[in-house]
Image: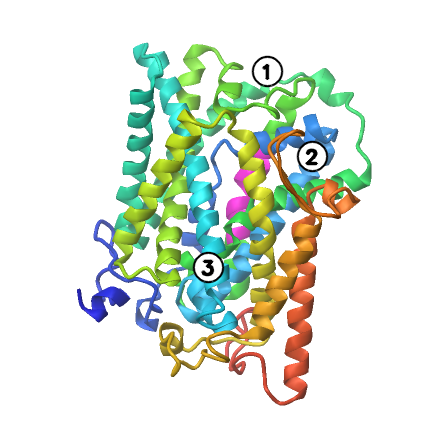
Amino acid sequence: MSATELAGTAPVDSNRVGAIETRGIEPVPPGERTGGPGQLFWVWFAANISILGLPLGATLVALRGMNIWQALVVAAIGSFGSFALVGLISVAGKWGGAPSMTLSRAVFGPRGNHGPTLVSWLSRVGWETVNTTTAAYALLALLSIVFGLTANPVLTVISLLVFVVLTLVVSGLGHATLVQVQKWATYVFGALNVLVGAFLVSRVDWDAVTHAPAAPLSVVIAGIGVIAAGTGIGWANAGADMARYQHRHVPGGRIVAAASVGAGVPLFLLIGLGGLLSAGDGSLASASDPVSAIQVMLPSWMAVPYLLAAFGGLLLSNNLSVYSAGLTMITLGVRARRVVAVGLDIVLTLAGGVYFMLVADDFYGPFITFISLLAVPITAWVAVFLVDMLFRRTYDPDGLMDTGRTGVYWAHGGFRWSAVLPWLAGIVVGLLFTTASTSATDVWFAGPLADSWMGSNGLGWVAAFVVAGGLYLLAAAFGNRRGTPVAAPRPDDQLTGVRP
């Protein structure tokens, strides 16, 4: 394979529906950036209509003691707000025409970027494993209802294979196909979600809902952090991956709105419904299998459309996650075409699904543990990256691909320490407040400040964000005073939509 093929150089017509996208991580030429905010709206809407929003809402009411009004406020701020951050990073994708973690080379240096990129890839693989496992549970339940088949190891593996193959078809073909599938499939699975949601509302204990006492303000503030960590923060490092095909003159504010509203609407509805269902019944919040926990609330005739909606929603989320993971894997240094990187990612996801379903005893516990741990380094990266966006509006296309000593972003031995050190400091401080555990007796890690208010409410990632962003901002200000600007000049102001 030639160096050009390994780099992923793509012909002009490679980004077509039904064709395999041959472009890897190299920046999209301006002439091929024809997308608009509507594409991003449907991509993010589709990625967030999965049932994983229901247990998040159940946690707010059943475990944190909020009433439904507080839960709805938390759902709105946490989901819309966290995906606004995703939208801001998407704006950088419009500026540079490259995936998020490829653009990150300009911030951290080609070698310094390996750490954030590895964390990003682990995050994507983790989410894909969660999606795959949950979808396989849904398919097994569907096969039991329709055909009377009893779950066994062989049928479990087949269910996992069906899901990953469907994911591979869409993610492997690439951007243009993904955009179209996400849009039209949203209509189908979105309608099924509305149907099932309307039925579930009829099962709500409205007396328990209306008489639930309010939780303290501190619990509400902590709840916003929980929802943000479980929704937009997990997607932040994928923001630019789809936005790299956006037209250069699309106002940044519309890109931010497309991500925030596109993801926020379905998340708000699903989290709110999860909160309603948990008023007076906390079984959903503590369920090891959220698919079964919802299914027992439904008659068999309604369970079929519910399981189809669950399977489809998780598939739409997984399509985007696997596509992003393939790009991240290439950025990390895997010398393979994009479609091959996607295939490698699928194999790892399948192995993770087999472990969760056939080996591990608990599903939801590891899920929460996974979120709490990876939220810390991801938000530290988000903080540094967003601060860097204040000082730049362009990325050098050749520099992003040149990871050698001659590259414009090489800095000091491949590291931009003004970004790497704040990122590391943010992680250290964030972990001081973090507890990673699946239960009270199964504690993986506990920071020395984990028992503080921030620690006990899972807000270590907030501390990481503040410290990493603050330190990088200080480094940028100090560098500018010394006449060595932290980033490239600012030839335009497309974040606010003002064109030169």
Quick one: SS at disc 2? helix
Dot 3 or dot 1: first in sequence order is: 3
- Marks 3 and 1 close (CB-CB < 8 Å): no
Nearest the eye: 399 or 208: 399
- Residue that mark 2 sits on: 71
> Which residue is at the far bottom?
483
Q: Taking 399 as reference, is 71 left or right?
A: right
| Nearer the camera: disc 1 or disc 2 | 2
Q: Tell me the quarter of the image containing the N terminus.
A: bottom left
Q: Residues within 10 Å of mark 1 (few under 14, many from 20)?
A: few
Q: Which residues are magenta?
A: 259-271
Is residue 63 visible in the rendered structure shown here?
A: yes
Amino acid carrying label 2: it is Ala
Q: Taking 468 as reference, is 231 left or right?
A: left
Amino acid carrying label 1: it is Arg
- Residue that mark 3 sits on: 117
Q: Is residue 445 above or below residue 105?
A: above
- Residue that mark 1 sits on: 203
User: Where's residue 399, x and y in %?
Assistant: 39, 77
Give the distance between the C-alpha atoms of the residues marked 3 and 1, in whole angstroms: 44 Å
Task: Judge whether residue 328 is colored magenta.
Answer: no
Q: Is residue 56 above or below residue 251?
A: above
Give the distance between the C-alpha atoms of the residues marked 3 and 2, in whole angstroms: 34 Å
Amino acid carrying label 3: it is Thr
